[in-house]
Image (cartoon, grey):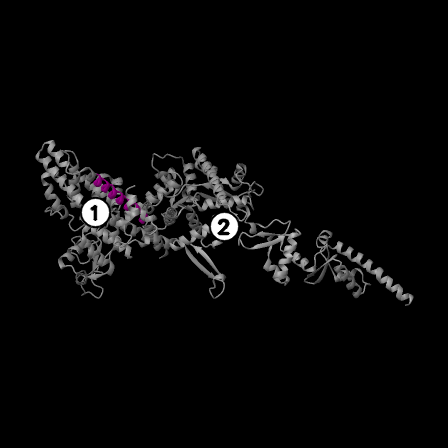
């Protein structure tokens, strides 16, 4: 983990779980796998706090434990996973996707699971039903079966998965008999029942909470509900399957790129192709399984009734496009077509790099950057000639890009002594290292944005506290029934400039929040690209 | 002095003029030059000394050129015009002129003249000034190194590599000219693409009609008349390439029949305006993505997120 990643993870842990968990988490990230005693010793925190923090991290899947490496008698070692912690940044995007795909029910299920880490199906269903009932009108409530069906749909499309049983844990449903307590970390997919919905007996409706219960509920919201009833699925815990969401985001990125470059109909065709290969393609595949034109024609949405020859023309267009989103893999069945996932990701990453250079350094520097990406190695004179930029300015721009490490210099000597007058100096751009560098910049940027947000909140802490107190007073006055004059009197305790300050503070925080999400989109593209190259070269 | 001697003398004088005439005839027959061998074949009764004497006389009169090639010496007729030009110049000047003539339209640098002729620098400079004043050679400033001057014959057009071609006027790169051409070409291609998109025909036809060959673009630019210099199709193609590097245009090559307008070696290049693949990426929507002091920014330092002025401006926007 790089320093920037550790810093970002620390900030995210602090915001969501508090400073103690942050301390333990960052310590584990920096030092690798450690056992309990070492952690206590090095962080200087008391035993029970460390234990609780580790519990929180394990509950959310950010920390794994296994028996020590030195032998079976060693104490268990804990290892934090930075990638998992960085996913916290993407929670809003996951929740929003679930909402678009499965409506409010899906949104709330995902939200609950993200908040709790691991939960059984029955408790999730009950909590979500209660929450949905809360927002409905009086007299109506949400049936458990609806929520259960939404849950099952999420499991079918693999957005939710079972948590892998911990090695050595007492599991009532031992799904893999005969597995020795191995020291390797097991992925959820290695269990065959990963996506099987258990049969639970859960009949009822959501309970509406009344306002008198508000105070209690706030306290118990963090604690797991101690439910005395059992529903037949004890010990089966569910977690959100981030990889599946990532595949979905990647598909969306490819579809929107096709829509931008070509047109709406082409993007619909690509969307159909990707939908058909959702479950048949492995996550790290270079391209989807070949689909025949006949199948595509049959699976197009009914609203798009285009004729078969027109579809063939569109497919030919997609194949001929220089971006190579779609490739032809054979001639049977009217032509077999694949979506080139890795190539699409590489093109999107390249477009991201180009856009970053363009916005930061101007369109002429972007021209030089694109030129070097296309032609690989060029001398300075050639750069000036191809880009049609005057020599002085071209030199200036090249040196600026070089100092920012976006462009590299390759020396090719003509003589064994690297005499400068007898050496070729070629400029080049390497896409993968540049993408990694930009990714690190993204981490730093998000950390900066979070710090600025915390700073702004801290600055106006006094004002925020005052406004919170005034709101509480207003609420209690309203409940106990007061005259309008009393209410306005209380309201006027906040002066107009203070109100303005609060308003601007709110705007600032919103802006910083949305900026974090935008940078997260860039982060996702670059991470997907880097991991796609890692698997293809492995 | 016997009669025989007298007659041999007169015959030798008479023979001389006859020899000159004969050798000149031979030279005119072989404009590329004649060797000793050729003269010998033609006049086998001639003795080598007489031949050599005749040739020397012709050389000193300046009517023959002495050249050397791989098989020996060549004698070539000097044409009357150049012979008259060099009248009054001495041998050194002739040598320098020869060297400059050989350099063709690329021109030659004064230091290179010095190497080839082995004359001292002062002499060279005097000779060059002399020749320039006689309007036999001229100096052209090279565009690659602005201090360097190359010399070439007065009536020759300098080569493209020296002047830079259509994009340079007086050694200055015309960036506004290039910019204007750039925008015009792009607008042409973009309107073509928009028109084809609005025509709502089948997608293949749409795409094919949004393409423009380099020849079409060239014709359009010529008809616009924004260029004072004549632009060739290659020049237009370099402009279109810069549009490709701007990411606004894409190019394909198709096979074309020889003889169709605009085809080069059986190929045609087609250009088409395109839309960008993604919107500006999220990172650059934040001040940190564009910050010039990004690497110096640390929490607790002089430049930090808490006191960043760029962020303050951006938040209040």
Q: From the top left corner, tell me how far across and down residue A304 is, in percent.
A: 36, 35
- Evaluate whether label 2 is on the same chain as label 1: yes
Q: Nearer the viewer, mark 2 or mark 1?
A: 1
Question: Magenta stretch mostly in which secondary structure?
Answer: helix
Which chain does the residue under circle 1 lie in? A
- Split into 4 quadrants, where in the image is the C terminus of chain B? top left
| Mark seen at residue A15 | none
Compared to A131, does B66 lie above or below?
below
| Mark seen at residue A459 | 1
Residue furthest toward the top? A484
Left or right: A369 as drawn, with respect to A251: right
Left or right: A516 as drawn, with respect to B127: left
Give the camera-side residue of A236 and A458. Answer: A458
Compared to A29, does A293 lie above or below?
above
Sequence-first disc among 2 and 1 = 2
Q: From the top left corner, tell me how far across and down residue A207 is, in percent.
A: 12, 39
Label 1 secondary element: helix
CB under 8 Å between callouts 2 and 1?
no
Q: From the top left corner, tell me how far across and down residue A181 is, in percent.
A: 20, 60
Residue named by callout 2: A385
Which region is colored magenta? A500-524
Q: CA distance from mark 2 to mark 1?
A: 54 Å
Give the camera-side residue of A185 and A259. Answer: A259
Which chain does the residue under circle 2 lie in? A
Q: Does any portion of residue A266 appear in the rendered image?
A: yes
Question: Is residue A501 in the magenta section?
Answer: yes
The residue lying at 26 percent from left, 55 percent from top is: A6
Residue furthest toward the left? A480
- Split into 4 quadrants, where in the image is the N terminus of chain B? bottom right
Q: From the top left corner, tell me how far across and down residue B150 is, in percent.
A: 59, 54
Question: Is residue B210 in the magenta section?
Answer: no
Q: Quadrant of the rendered structure where residue B73 is? A: bottom right
């Amino acid at each position: 983990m790089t320093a920037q990643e550790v810093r970002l993870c620390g900030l995210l842990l602090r915001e969501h779980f508090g400073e103690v968990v942050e301390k333990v988490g960052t310590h584990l990230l920096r030092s690798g796998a450690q056992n309990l005693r070492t952690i206590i010793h090095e962080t200087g925190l008391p035993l029970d706090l460390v234990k609780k923090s580790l519990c929180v991290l394990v509950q959310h899947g950010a920390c794994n434990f296994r028996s020590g490496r030195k032998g079976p008698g060693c104490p268990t070692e804990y290892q934090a996973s930075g990638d998992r912690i960085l996913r916290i940044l993407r929670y809003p995007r996951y929740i929003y996707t679930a909402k678009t795909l499965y409506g409010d029910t899906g949104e709330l299920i995902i939200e609950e699971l993200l908040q709790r880490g691991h939960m059984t199906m029955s408790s999730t269903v009950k909590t979500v039903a209660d929450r949905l009932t809360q927002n409905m009108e009086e007299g109506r409530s949400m049936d458990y079966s609806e929520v259960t069906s939404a849950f099952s749909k999420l499991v079918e499309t693999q957005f939710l998965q079972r948590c892998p049983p911990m090695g050595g844990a007492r599991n009532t449903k031992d799904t893999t008999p005969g597995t020795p307590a191995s020291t390797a970390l097991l992925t959820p997919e290695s269990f065959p029942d990963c996506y099987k919905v258990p049969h639970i007996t859960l009949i009822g409706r959501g309970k509406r909470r009344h306002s008198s219960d508000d105070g209690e509920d706030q306290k118990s919201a963090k604690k797991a509900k101690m439910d005395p009833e059992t529903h037949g699925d004890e010990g089966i815990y569910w977690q959100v399957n981030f990889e599946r969401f990532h595949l979905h985001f990647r598909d969306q990125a490819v579809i929107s790129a096709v829509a931008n470059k070509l047109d709406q109909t082409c993007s619909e065709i690509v969307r159909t192709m990707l939908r058909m290969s959702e479950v048949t393609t492995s996550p790290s595949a270079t391209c989807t399984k070949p689909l025949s034109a006949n199948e595509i024609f049959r699976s197009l949405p009914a609203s798009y009734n285009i004729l078969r020859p027109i579809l063939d023309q569109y497919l030919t267009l997609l194949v001929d496009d220089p971006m190579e989103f779609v490739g032809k893999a054979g001639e049977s069945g009217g032509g077999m077509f694949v979506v080139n996932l890795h190539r699409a990701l590489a093109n999107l990453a390249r477009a991201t790099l180009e856009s970053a250079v363009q916005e930061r350094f101007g369109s002429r520097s972007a021209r030089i950057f694109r030129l070097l990406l296309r032609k690989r190695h060029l001398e300075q004179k050639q750069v000036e000639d191809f880009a049609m930029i005057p020599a002085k300015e071209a030199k200036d721009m090249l040196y600026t890009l070089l100092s920012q490490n976006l462009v590299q210099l390759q020396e090719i000597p003509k003589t064994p002594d690297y005499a400068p007058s007898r050496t070729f100096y070629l400029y080049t751009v390497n896409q993968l290292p540049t993408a990694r560098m930009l990714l690190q910049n993204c981490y730093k940027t998000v950390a900066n944005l979070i710090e600025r947000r915390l700073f702004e909140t801290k600055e106006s802490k006094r004002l925020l506290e005052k406004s919170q107190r005034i709101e509480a007073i207003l609420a209690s006055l309203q409940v106990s029934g007061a005259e309008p004059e009393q209410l306005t009197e209380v309201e006027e305790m906040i002066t107009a400039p203070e109100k303005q300050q609060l308003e601007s503070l709110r705007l600032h925080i919103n802006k910083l929040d949305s900026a974090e999400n935008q940078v997260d989109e860039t982060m996702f593209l670059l991470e997907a690209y880097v991991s796609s190259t890692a698997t293809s070269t492995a | 002095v016997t009669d025989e001697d007298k007659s041999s003398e007169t015959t030798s004088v008479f023979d001389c003029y006859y020899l000159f005439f004969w050798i000149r005839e031979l030279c005119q027959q072989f404009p590329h030059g004649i060797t000793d061998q050729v003269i010998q074949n033609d006049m086998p009764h001639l003795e080598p000394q007489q031949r050599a004497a005749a040739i020397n006389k012709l050389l000193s009169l300046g009517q023959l050129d002495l050249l050397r090639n791989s098989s020996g010496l060549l004698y070539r007729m000097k044409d009357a015009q150049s012979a008259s030009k060099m009248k009054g110049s001495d041998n050194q000047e002739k040598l320098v002129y020869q060297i400059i003539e050989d350099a063709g339209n690329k021109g030659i640098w004064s230091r290179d003249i010095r190497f080839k002729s082995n004359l001292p620098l002062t002499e060279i400079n005097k000779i060059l000034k002399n020749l320039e004043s006689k309007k036999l050679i001229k100096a052209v400033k090279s565009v690659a190194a602005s201090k360097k001057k190359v010399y070439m014959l007065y009536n020759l057009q300098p080569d493209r590599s020296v002047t830079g071609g259509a994009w340079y006027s007086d050694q200055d790169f015309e960036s506004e000219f290039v910019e204007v051409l750039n925008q015009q070409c792009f607008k042409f291609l973009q309107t073509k693409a928009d028109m084809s998109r609005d025509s709502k025909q089948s997608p293949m036809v749409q795409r094919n009609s949004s393409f423009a060959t380099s020849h079409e673009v060239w014709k359009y630019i010529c008809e616009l008349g924004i260029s004072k210099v004549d632009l060739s199709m290659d020049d237009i193609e370099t402009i279109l390439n810069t549009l490709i590097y701007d990411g606004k245009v894409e190019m394909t090559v198709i096979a074309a029949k020889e003889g169709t307008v605009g085809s080069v070696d059986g190929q045609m290049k087609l250009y088409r305006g395109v839309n960008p693949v993604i919107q500006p990426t999220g990172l650059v929507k934040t001040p940190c993505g564009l910050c010039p002091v990004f690497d110096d920014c640390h929490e607790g330092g002089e430049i930090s997120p808490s006191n960043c002025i760029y962020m303050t401006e951006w938040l209040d926007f």
